Image (cartoon, rainbow, N blue to C red):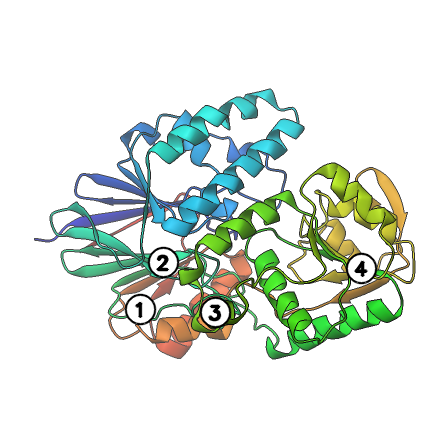
């Protein structure tokens, strides 16, 4: 029997963030992801506007991974009446808790009482009471002839594609796809025989530099800073990037490639998330698992100090150079890194190392572009330190990577819906998929509904 399928692109089209898709088939209403739109402040209206569907009528919410642009609106969904089931992989469920609590913390600092009541402890608790963590590949039945399972996306710990099978036809939502090979995670799983693909397109229009060089650059930057007796500041994202960096630093220290010196992980969120990574070792790739057999502690090495409390963080200033400070946020728009930048950027012996994407207009981007003075949390700071950028740390597939991913399943494909990218990058990927693989690709607009028969 054939079914009519409708997909509404409620968010995550025309932009990288804010993923939220409604899949309707038979009498079932399923949401894929429920993320915050980022790039502005979390408190921006777009994140708190009503959903374009009634959350009370939704049966299932399936989450691809623990980044807040994929799950950050879950407390609002609960607040607005959702009481269906939530599914994700086991690591995603574990990582989701600190991620949601951290967002609640940011909102409470802003003293926005309306939003605090939406993002309440009760709503977060209720979300987890509805939440099931399941392993990759386990089939979950939705109705007769309708089921889904998770496939490893290789993007962050626990990240997944969602593979729906309806009347024998496959509909796959990619979520974010990792920049494989990753030092920690297995490669993105190859998927076959897909009929309809809903895929992300961030970096659909460009290729990354080689990842092989990045470790060499990291080593060189740390050595240069050591020789200058400076402080090296690395602004970083708490989830995945911090753990990748710790893993690589561990390797450099254990193999005597860099001298032992104080290396501070000055991010309470990253410290909490790293503890969760340690609990899910079987989700790492073979190389990382082997390293663990030899060393036991792949995120811990001589010199590493975790500074959980803010008093400990303030003490970092009094520790003699050379030293390294890893702190959030990744774009220097808030978090503890801001205090370190105020303190260390004016000194030419110090170095700021940028390893993450810097959004247009963010302090990190301005510093990267070479401004001599930067406005950081209400203060003008003179930039005299070294500024270094390492590309190759991206957690997303690039244009060629996305194309290769689709090529594996191109034969059966009836249509690809290209989402989660800036318009230019979505359009570019649509064109490439048509030209290079001859598949029917289309970039839907926000709010648009498409339908097909399965
Ligand atoms: Zn992501």
Vertical comparison of 204 with 106: above or below: below
- Around disc 2, counting alpha carbons within 10 Å, would you say few (fewer than 14), some (14 to 19), or many (20 or more)? many
Which residue is disc 3 drawn over?
293
* Mark closest to the chain's N terminus, 4 or 1: 1
Write the residue at 61% across / 57% down.
242
Q: Nearer the viewer, mark 2 or mark 3?
A: 3
The one of 245 and 329 positioned closer to us in this rendering: 245
Q: Which residue is mark 4?
A: 323
The span from disc 4 to disc 3 (Cα, nearest Å) is 29 Å
Determine which of the numbered discs, if any, sits on residue 161 in the image. 2
Q: Residues within 10 Å of mark 3 (few under 14, many from 20)?
A: few
> Of 18 and 129, which appears nearest the observer?
129
Whether residues under marks 2 and 3 lie with C-beta atoms below 8 angstroms apart, the answer is no
Which residue: 81% across, 50% down?
A: 341
Of the numbered discs 2 and 1, the one sitting upstream in the chain is 2
Relative image position of residue 403 (x, y in whole percent): 43, 73
Is the residue marked 4 within 8 Å of ligand 1, measured from its CB? no
- Residue 198, x across and y down, in percent: 36, 58
Looking at the rendered structure, the secondary structure element under dot 1 is loop
Label 3 or label 1, whichever lies nearer to me, is 3
- Residue 191 numbered mark, or none: 1
- Left/right of residue 167 with respect to residue 418 in the rendered view: left
């Amino acid at each position: 029997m054939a079914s009519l399928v409708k997909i509404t692109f409620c968010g995550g089209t025309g932009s990288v963030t804010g993923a939220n898709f409604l899949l309707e088939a038979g009498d079932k209403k399923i949401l894929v992801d429920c993320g915050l739109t980022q790039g502005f402040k979390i408190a921006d209206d777009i994140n708190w506007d009503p959903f374009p569907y009634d959350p009370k009528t939704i049966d299932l919410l399936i989450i691809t991974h623990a980044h807040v642009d994929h799950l950050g609106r879950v407390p609002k969904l609960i607040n607005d009446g959702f009481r269906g089931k939530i599914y994700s992989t086991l690591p995603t469920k574990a990582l989701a808790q600190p991620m949601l609590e951290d967002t609640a913390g940011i909102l409470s600092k802003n003293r926005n009482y309306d939003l605090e009541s939406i993002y309440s402890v009760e709503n977060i608790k209720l979300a987890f009471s509805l939440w099931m963590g399941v392993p990759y590949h386990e089939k979950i039945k939705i109705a007769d002839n309708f089921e889904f399972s998770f496939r490893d996306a290789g993007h962050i710990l626990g990240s997944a594609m969602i593979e729906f099978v309806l009347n024998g036809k496959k509909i796959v939502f990619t979520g974010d796809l990792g920049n494989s090979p990753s030092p920690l995670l297995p490669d993105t799983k190859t998927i076959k025989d897909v009929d309809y693909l809903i895929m992300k397109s961030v970096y659909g229009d460009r290729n990354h530099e080689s990842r092989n060089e990045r470790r060499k650059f990291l080593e060189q930057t740390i050595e240069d800073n050591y020789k200058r007796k400076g402080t090296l500041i690395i602004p970083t994202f708490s989830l995945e990037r911090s753990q990748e960096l710790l893993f690589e630093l561990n390797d450099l220290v254990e193999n005597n490639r860099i001298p032992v010196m104080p290396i501070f992980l000055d991010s309470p969120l990253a410290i909490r998330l790293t503890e969760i990574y340690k609990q899910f070792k079987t989700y790492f790739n073979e190389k990382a698992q082997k390293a663990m057999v030899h060393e036991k502690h792949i995120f811990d090495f001589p010199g590493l100090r975790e500074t959980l409390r803010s008093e400990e963080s303030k003490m970092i200033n009094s520790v003699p150079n050379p030293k390294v400070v890893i702190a959030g946020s990744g774009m220097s728009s808030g978090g503890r890194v801001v205090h370190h930048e105020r303190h260390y950027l004016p000194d030419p012996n110090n170095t700021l190392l940028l390893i993450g994407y810097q959004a247009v207009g963010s302090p990190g981007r301005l510093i990267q572009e070479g401004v001599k003075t930067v406005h950081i949390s209400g203060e003008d700071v003179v930039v005299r330190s070294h500024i270094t950028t390492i590309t190759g740390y991206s957690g997303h597939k690039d244009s060629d990577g996305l194309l290769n991913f689709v090529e594996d399943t191109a034969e059966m494909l009836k249509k690809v819906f290209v989402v989660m990218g800036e318009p230019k990058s979505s359009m570019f990927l649509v064109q490439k998929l048509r030209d290079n693989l001859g598949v029917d690709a289309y970039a839907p607009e926000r709010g648009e509904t498409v339908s097909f028969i399965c």
